[in-house]
Amino acid sequence: SLQGQEFPVVIDADPMGATVTFKDGQSHRVSSDWVPGQSLARLDVDGTLVVIKVGKIPGGFRMRLRGADMKVFVRTPRQAELARLMPEKMPPDTSKLLLCPMPGLIVSVAVQEGDEVQEGQALCTVEAMKMENILRAEKKTIVTKVNATAGDSLAVDDVIMEFE
């Protein structure tokens, strides 16, 4: 699959490369000396040189070609059938968290646990790259937990505080 869309192919490999035939009958002659682990793949596709940046991701590859960033998964027909049945992993819900937007130092925390905050109210100040950034409430809510104090050094996406 490429970016979630399946492209069934038949690959007929020989010592000089491979013929890749798509479901619609269209075929291409491909050869390359690329081996897994190399970050650049140089391919000859029907006589045209194609250079692709390749990186490993779980279950597949991340490929970049002419500015396009693609996730590619190569599967057997059975693996593809089973992959279609797998639920899509949802990103975690961070709507009730204040995450540190960049690595930095907590300069001040303006609220305490139990405080009711209004939309736009300053919650804390983070210093990063010699600049102070005031982090504000996105909506009216109640602070349930403060995980950071002034002087703490935080990484990106560390939880500063939690909300109701």
Image: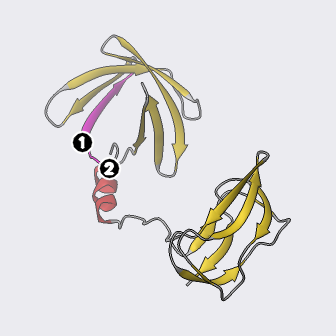
- The furthest residue to the right: 151
Residue 92 in picture, x, y percent from top left: 50, 69
Tell me, for residue 30, which label it has, or none.
Answer: none
Residue 54: image location, x then y, percent: 51, 33
Mark 1 lies on residue:
8
Q: Position of residue 64 (x, y in %)?
A: 46, 32
Name the residue: 71% across, 67% down. Answer: 124
Q: Secondary structure at mark 2?
A: loop
Residue 120 is one of the magenta-drawn residues: no
Residue stretch rendered in magenta on the structure:
4-15
Q: Is 50 above or below relative to 96?
A: above
Q: Residues within 10 Å of mark 1 (few under 14, many from 20)?
A: some
Q: Amino acid at mark 1?
A: Pro
Disc marking residue 4: 2
Quadrant housing the N terminus: top left
**Left or right: residue 92 compared with residue 87:** right
Q: Residue 98, position in %: x, y?
A: 61, 69
Q: Residues within 10 Å of mark 2 (few under 14, many from 20)?
A: few
Q: Which residue ends up furthest to the left in the rendered image?
A: 24
Q: Nearer the viewer, residue 46 or 70?
A: 70
Q: Nearer the viewer, residue 8 or 164?
A: 164
- Identify residue type, mark 2: Gly
Residue at 73 percent of width and 62 percent of height: 125
Is 1 left, or right, of 38 in this rendering?
left
Q: Residue furthest bottom?
A: 114
Image quadrant containing the C terminus: bottom right
